[in-house]
Amino acid sequence: MAILINDDKKIFTLQTRNSTYQMKVGDFGYLYHLYYGKRIDHQDLSYLLYDGPSHFAPYPYESKNRVGSLTLMPQEFPTVGTGDLGSVALDVENADGTRIIDLKYKGYEVLDGKYSLTELPSFYAHDNDAQTLKITLVDVVSDIEVELYYGVFEDKDVITRAVVISNLSENAIQIKKAQSLSLDLISGQYDLIHFHGRWADERNFERVPLTHNVTTFGSDYGISSAKENPGFILLDKNTTEETGNCYGFNLVYSGNFQATAELGTLEQSRITLGLGDNEFSWQLDPGAMFEAPEAIMSFSSTGLTQLSHNFHDAIRENLCRNKYINGPRPVLINNWEATYFDFTGKKLLEIATAAKDIGANLFVMDDGWFGKRSDDNSSLGDWFVNEQKLGCSLNELVTKINTLGMEFGIWFEPEMVNEDSELYNAHPDWVLNFPQRKPLLSRGQMVLDMSKEAVQNYLFDRISDVLDSANVSYIKWDMNRPITEWYSKSLTDKRQGELQHRYVLGLYKLLGRLTRRYPDVLFEGCSSGGARFDLGMLAYEPQIWTSDNTDAINRLKIQYGTSFFYPISTMGSHISASPNHQNGRVTPFETRANVAMAGTFGYELDVTKMSDADKKQAKTYTDFYKRVQEMTFNGDYYRLVSPFDRNNDVMAWQIVSKDKSQSLVTIVATDVVGNPPFVYIKLRGLKSDAKYKIKNHIYSGDALMNAGLKLMQPKGNYPSEQIYIEEASNSK
Ligand code: GLA
């Protein structure tokens, strides 16, 4: 049983295979958080609660002995105005101007399966692999009810959370802040790992100690952003990849978000995660309800690798939806870095023909096929095929590519518009902009008001027309600028604070309509590379372009940071030209291939210009990738050497099939020295008592994991080595 209730003591325990989460209705009906950590069976943990004096801290009026201050007690869902002086999860302004919501326990329900949200994406259950606990809290004065949902995926060691706020009163209230997750840990000293970055340098790993200052990070970019990712980790000081306690948190959301982490006055730790509250406010009318996005959390007592595996398994199996997630994913060739805007149908066909020979089976036509777009100054919004540029209709081009035996994919940037476009001329009021002011431009473009139904309908019709006109099997859904003008003409002045969230709801509505209508089309997310790499997008698009930076060496850090939460099967990763277009670095073909193989593999270069030697190598790599794709996508990922560790001149990772019969190890040298030592790497995740074959040698699992493998002596420019390992009895 995943959910255990002690009705007498009002204790709620969520049990997963290796973790326990416990809450209790405490003094005066407040819901306290007791514990989240390594699994504990049959224990009321309320003895951990603070029962000392409140001193000068504010305590509830009903408290006869001056105890029970909410700033000292661990809260399940801290709220404004109740004497909790940390970062609260819920802040409202009532109709009379008061800033208080005092939530007390009302009741609970245990539901079979996993709850879902009405307007937001969320994790889903298979064959009852999840159970739901719903706890209802109420403020009896203002008549506001809050439902806390917990989705318990027992076998996956994952718990999801959602919050639904209902206004049962006669008056509208303003929600000023609504977080999806708050967690108070009574004891412990923690570090925080978060993933920050910028364009072409996404998801850098940073580990910092938790302090008494509130650490706040998030995004005000309108997208989850390259600046910070919503996924972050709290961990014991001594936790490593292989040992120690750690907690991971992430949000199923693609817009502005905010996370906080702080130490309280009694050294308790609090973290919160949810919608960004900068400029946010939401009018909740009488009878209305508000859903906060879903959050997901997991705990591992055996280090960061296990934490990542928990997230990877849940994301692959309980979030991504698409026919491609269980079958082979195509190897794509994208023409962006091959041609940029400068192409014709003939050129595209030449690239596709050459790419077919190296084993690619999906050709993707990137930016520049629509309106009169020949650079990035015009035509976004005019999703009409430029037949003059292609020299034929889309259907003719797709038919030719299909005849080669390749599928066809196409690029869109639906949320955007250029001033120089038919769409802008017809509907200047569809753009997000402040009245009487000139908009800020970014890459020469403006953002459409996705909260508007007319905009959603226009995009649905335009995209559907293109998809219906030819045999298109893939869409790259791009979004290339931050959103800065939060003003919609369809909202009243008082409701402008709702726009940030309404934008994301509009985007999800459109994506939901399109993915339902075209269930066989593979969607890949993109946002100037990886600026919207989040669980919200992954619910619709099972793969995301990880970064516009295709340099294999820079990618080591980007893919390493991304791997903490997101599985290999979600990370778009391509072989591009050398010298690299972003940083000019020269790398050998095999290193570019080995790095691209740790993702949804593809090519992003002019194949017609590749040397015969490179083409031959490419075909070998593509064939090998297809052979091991099932293992790399569904297996377990191990970070062996960190690229953020300055003491290392190599980076290494390993993928192991779930049955531990196959594995792939990759090392890449990021620097070389004179008289180099051999690189020795200890492998992980194998069966210690099994025999494994590497090339023509047999090793025991024990030896590979404890003594390690002797690998190359790195020489030359960024050499790399990839080793395929197979259980000896399984070798064919
Ligand atoms: C963004 C994407 C690229 C490419 C260009 C096209 O930068 O990240 O992959 O599609 O847009 O304009």
Image (cartoon, grey):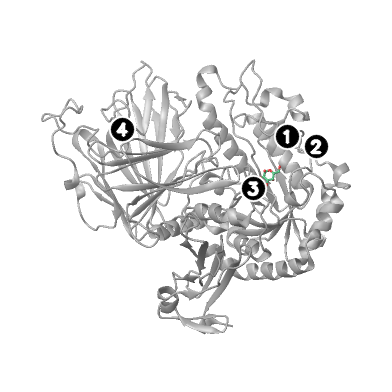
Whether label 3 lies within 8 Å of ligand 1 gets the answer: yes
Residue tagged 1: 381
Q: Which mark is residue 86?
A: 4
- Dot 2 surroundings within 10 Å: few (below 14), some, or many (20 or more)? some
- Does 593 sit above or below residue 470? below
Q: Is mark 4 within 8 Å of ligand 1?
A: no
Numbered disc 1: secondary structure: loop
Q: Earlier in the sequence, mark 2 or mark 3?
A: 2
Q: Which of the marked residues, 3 or 4, is nearer the chain's N terminus? A: 4
Q: Quadrant of residue 174?
A: top left
Please state if 506 lies on the left or on the right of 180 as rendered: right
Q: Looking at the image, is 174 positioned above or below residue 662?
A: above
- In the rendered structure, which amino acid carries the disc numbered 3? Asp
Q: Earlier in the sequence, mark 1 or mark 4?
A: 4
Is residue 292 visible in the rendered image? The answer is no
Residue placed farthest to the front in the image? 674
Proximity of marks 2 and 1: CB atoms separated by less than 8 Å: yes
Name the residue beneath numbered marker 3: 548
- Depth check: 241 or 473 in front? 241
* Image location (x, y in percent) of residue 661: 50, 75
What separation in Å lies between label 1 and label 4 (alpha carbons)? 45 Å
Provide residue 202's location: percent of width, then percent of height: 55, 46
The x and y percentages for residue 199 are: 59, 42
Confirm whether residue 641 shows in the render.
yes
Point out which mark residue 55 bears. none
Amino acid type at image mark 4: Gly
* 593 relative to 227 in the view: left or right: right
- The amino acid on which the numbered mark 1 sits, given as a three-letter code, is Gly
Disc ID at residue 371? 2
Above or below for 432 versus 586: above
